[in-house]
Amino acid sequence: MPFACIFVPDFPAEAILRAEPELRSQAIAVLEGKPPLQKVFAINEKARRIGIEPCMTKIQVEPWTDLTLRPRSLLQETAAHAALLDCAQSFSPRVEDTAADTVILDLSGLESLFGSLPQIARDIARRTSDLGLEANVATAFNPDTARFAARGFPGVTVIPEGKEAERLGNLPLDVLFSGLTAPNTSEADARILETFDLWGVRNLRALCALPEVALSERMGQTGPYLQQLARGAVARTLVPVEPPLIFEEAMELEHPLVLLEPLAFLLAHMLDQLSVRLGARALAAQKLRLQLTLDNGFHFVEDVPAEESSPSQKSQSTTRSSQFTNCHPERSERPAFPTRSAPLPTNLQSEIPNQKSASEPGLYAPEGGLCDEYLQSKLETRNSKLFTRTLELPVPMLDAKVFLKLLQLDLKAHPPGAPILKVHLSAIPAQPRSTQGGLFQPPTPEPEKLELTLARIAGMVGEEKVGSLQLLDSHRPGAFRMRHFVPTQPKGQKEKSDSATTQAPITALRMFRPPLRVMVTLRDGKPAHLVCPKRKEVDGEILWMAGPWRSSGDWWEEDGWARDEWDIAIQSPVVSRQSSAVVSRGSTGGDARRSIIRNPASAKSSLALYRLVHDLLSGHWFVEGTYD
Amino acid sequence: MSSPLLHVEAISHFPLVARSSSAKLLKEFSETLAGVTPASRLEVRPAPETASSGIAQIDALTGGLPRGCLTEVCGPESSGRTTVMLAAIAAVTSREEICALIDASDALDPHSATAAGVNLERLLWIRCGSHAQSSALSRKRRQAFSLEERERRRMEDPVEQALRATDLLLQSSGFGMVAIDLAGVPLKMARRIPLTTWFRFRRAVENTPTLLLVTGTQACAQSCATLSLELSRQSSEISRQEKVLSSRSSVLNKRQSSEDRHDSRDETSASEKPSHAELLTGIEVQIEVLRSRMERKPVKSVGDFTTKAVWTA
C-alpha cells in the first residue's frame, strides 16, 4: 500500500515566506520570545549558509546586514498548515496530520487517477509549491519510511517496495529523532542518540546491521523498534483526519497600515492563497469575511491573561493530547517526538478553547478554531477596535481578482478609520456553481462581472439604492424593500402568448420621493386648487378629480397611517415640439431656451394627472406621484 | 553626392517606366483596390432584430423595439411614457431576460410595475440621486470649492449617476434591456447631456441583443436614436376633461352668484355635474414616430393606444 509524505523543512520560516514571497531570495531568521530575550527559532537554507544557527540571540544575529529578521507568527503557521492539509486532501481522502510540518497520505488506488507514483509525487510537490510552500515529497510502501525519506532527502523521492532499508541506509540517525536539537526534546532520546554515537552507529544502515538480540539486551524494546523503523519494516495503520472546510489566512503587520492601497497588495496575496486552497478542494467561496485589527486594539498573545483558562479547558487540552498519543503508537511508547516547530507556546496552549472534538491529532488546532472562534471570541469581548466586513457573494466564485476588487470597493465605501495592525481573511466555502447554458436561452450577465458592476454602482449611488425590489405584505403605501440583485437562471419556459401584448397597458404611476408638500384650497370639502412651492408645474386649479379613496392601517402601532387619495388633473405648461426645434437649431441655445422656459405664451399647456394624498393623521396634503 | 545622381536617374527612368508599364500599373492599382467596395455596391445594413414593446399598437407602428439600438420615448407629463417603459420591461422580463432600470429621479412605483406584469426578480433597479437632507448637510459642510469637492458634487448629480451607471451596465453586458428613465429630470439638465454620451451608448449596445430605451420629456439623443417616439395625450381626452372642467366651473360660478347652493345644484343637469364617483379609468395616448432608421418603414407615423387603470384590469 503506497504512502506519500509531505514535509516542509524550516516550517516557521516557510510560513513567513508563504506570506511574503518576495523574501524567498533572502536569508531569513524567525525570532521567538519576548523582546529582550528573543532567540532565533527557525531559519531558511540561505540563512544557514551564512552561518546563522537556531537558538542564537537577536543581538548575535543583528550584525548580519543581509539577514531579514521576522517574529514568529502563529497565525501564518496555522494558515500554512491548513494549506498543507488542503494540498494533501486534494489528492487523497485519507490524510494523516502527523505534525505541523508533516502530512502523510494514503495513495492506494490513486495510480489509475493520477498516474504512477513518481508522477503523483511530482504533482504533489507542484501543488505544494502553488500554495507557497517548498516541501520535500517522498513515496514509499510504509508511512514511516515515507516520513523518514521526506525528512532526509530533498525534493521528490520514490522508494520502491522492498528497497526501504537500502534507500534509507545513508540517512543519519537524527532522522529517527527529528527535531532533537529543539530545546524541548526529551532527554531519553538524547541519551539514546548519544549511546549510538558512542557505539559508532551514525546512520541507519549501521543500525540495521546491529544484532537484534544484543541490541534488545542493551536498550530494551526501544532498540529493536528503532531498528525495525530503520529497515522500513514497521507496519502501522494510518490515522486519517478529516479537516473541516475552514479557509482562513491571517497576517500580522510589523507597522500599522494607514492607506488602503498597500492593504490591497496584502489582500491580493491572501486572496490568491485562499483561491488556490479552495480550488485544491474543488470548492468556491460563497462568503468572504475580512477582519482588521486596528491600532490600539487587542494583541493576541501578549494580552491573554493566564487566569482566563478555565479548568475545563485545561482538561480538554489534556484529553486531546492523550488521544493524540493513542493515535500514534510509536509515540505512546516514546511520547517525545517533538518537531522543532510543532508545539504551541505553553501560554497559548492553555488559552485555546478546544471546543470541538479532540479526535484530530493536529498540534495547530486543525479544527481551525484557533483563528476563527478563538480570535473572534477574545477580540469581540476585549475591544471595540475590530473592524469586520462580510461580503455575501450571490453565487460561489473562485476568482481572486474579483474578490480583491469587491473588497477594495467595499473598503472604499466603508473605510476602517484607523491604522491596521492585523489582517484576517476567511472564506466560507460552497460547491462551485454548475451552469448548463442552453442555445435558446436568453443571455444573462456574467455573475462575477455583474457583481463588480453592482459594487461600483453601489459605491456611486449607495448600497440601499441598487438591487431588485421586493413587495412587502402590507397595504402601507411604499411598502417594499431592496434586495441584493441575483439574476435567476432562465428556466427555459416557452414564451408566453401575446395575450399580454394585445391587452391594454396599465396606467403607471410615477412617484415623487419624497412626496411634494402642497397647500390645497377646499371647496365643499373637495380640493379645488393647489399650490406647490417646490414644483411650479404642480400648481393651479384642479380641473378634474376623482376620489377620495380612504385607507388606513397599522393603527395599533406607533407608525399607523390613514389617508385619503384623490386623482386630480391640473394644467401644466409643456414646451411644444416646434419650440424645441427652435431651441435645437439655436447657435448657443441658451437665450432661446430661457425665453421658452420663461415665456408661457410660447408653451402649449397640457393636462397632467396627479395623485393627491391627504394625510389624515397630520392633516397635511401631498402630491404623491403623477400618472404617466 | 549620391542623392542628385539617383534623383537624375529616377527622373530619367520615370517616363520610360510610365510608358512601358502604365497598363501594368493600372492593373496593379485595380488589384490593390479590389478589396474596396464601391459606394454604389455597398450592401444594405441588415435590419436590427426587433423585440416586442409590450404594446400591440407600438409594435404595429414600428415593428417592435430594435435590439442593439437606442430607442427614445419622449413626451410631456402624463403622456404615458412610464406606461410604455413598464410595458417594455414587462415584455422583456416575460422572455426571461434580465432588465436594468436606471431611475434618474427615483420615481418607479413598485405596485405599478407589478400591475404592468414586470417580473421583479429579473429587474435591476438603480435609484439615482441622493437624499435632499444629506445633500443639504453636505452642502453646509463643504465650503471650499476645491476640485475634489466639485467632482464629488458632480457625482451627486442624478443625471451624472444615471449616465455612469448606464456605462457600467452596458460594459457588463448580458442584459436584455437597459432602460434609462430621465422623465423626471428637469429639461435643462437632460439637455446638458452631450451627444457624444449617446453616441457612446449606441456604440456600446451595437451588435448586442440589448435594448437601450430612454424616456424623457424631450428627445435628447437626437440622431443617435434609431427609433424615436413622441407620446401625447389624445385631444379627445383633453376636450372631455375640459368639458368636465367647464361644467364644473359653471357650477361653481352659479354657486358663487346665488346664495342658495341647493337651488343651483338643481339647475345643473345630472350629466353636467362632476361625478363624485368618477374614476380615472385610463389615458388615451397618441404615438408619433419622430425618427426611425429601421429598414422597415412604418406604414403610418401616428398611432394611439389606451391605457387602463389597475382596478379596471
Image: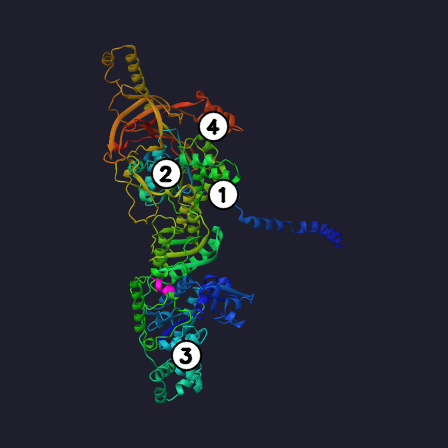
Give me the C-alpha separation between circle 2 and circle 3: 89 Å
Which amino acid type is shown beneath numbered disc 3? Answer: Ala
Residue B42, which numbered label?
1
Give me the C-alpha separation between circle 3 and circle 1: 93 Å
SS under mark 2: loop
**Looking at the picture, do discs 4 and 1 lie on one chain?**
no
**Looking at the picture, do discs 2 and 3 lie on one chain?**
no
Q: Chain of mark 3?
A: A
Circles 1 and 2, Cβ within 8 Å, touching? The answer is no
**Which residue position holds label 3?**
A190
Image spot of residue A366 (x, y percent): 35, 65
| Image position of B242 with respect to A269: above or below | above
| Image position of A4 with respect to A267: above or below | below
Image spot of residue A178 (x, y percent): 41, 75
| Image position of B54 with respect to A518: above or below | below
**Which residue position holds label 2?**
B64
Mark 3 or 1: in front is: 3
Q: Residue furthest front?
A: A307
Residue bounds of the magenta highlight: A347-352
For the C terminus of chain A, which image quadrant?
top left
Which amino acid type is shown beneath numbered disc 4? Answer: Ala
Question: Which callout, 4 or 3, points at the residue further toward the start of the chain?
Answer: 3
Q: Nearer the viewer, residue B132 or A501?
A: B132
Question: Which callout, 1 or 2, points at the residue further toward the start of the chain?
Answer: 1
SS under mark 4: helix
Image spot of residue A597 (x, y percent): 46, 25
In the image, residue A349 lies in the stretch drawn in magenta: yes
Mark 4 or 1: in front is: 4
